Amino acid sequence: MMMQIFFQSWLPFIYLYGVGGIFFFSGMYIVIKSGALNLKKRRHRFWLKILLGGFFFFMFMHAFLIIAALYL
């Protein structure tokens, strides 16, 4: 039963934020290295924080909702 829960809920979560995170952070690395995002500018740092915060916010919210659905 526990393996079925893992494969139906946590494995897609790990794939979504693992593989998706690799693409997201690779893209962020390319954007910063290409100079399109200048970290010396206040407005650019603001948007970088929004992007990173959004990624982690949705990851934690998704994990919380999985835990709530499975165990509460």
Image (cartoon, helix red, strand yellow):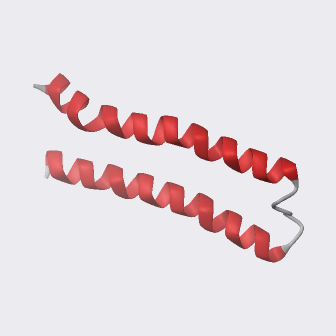
Q: Residue at x 61, y 58 (%)?
A: 52
Relative to 42, is 70 above or below? above
Q: Quadrant of residue 44?
A: bottom right
Query: Up-down: is 69 above or below 23?
Result: below
Query: In the drawing, does residue 42 fall left or right of residue 3?
Result: right
Give the side of residue 52 with respect to residue 55, left or right. Answer: right
Q: Residue furthest bottom?
A: 43
Q: Residue 68: percent from the left, percent from the top? A: 20, 53
Residue found 85% across the figure and 48% down from its top: 33
Measured as percent of width and height from the top left, residue 50 is found at 61, 68
Q: Is residue 21 above or below residue 51?
A: above
What residue sits 31% from the left and 54% below the top? 64
Q: Residue at image x 24%, y 48%?
A: 67
Q: x, y percentage for residue 37?
A: 81, 61
Task: Tell me residue 56's x, y (percent).
Answer: 51, 55
Q: Taking 28 as reference, is 20 above or below it?
A: above
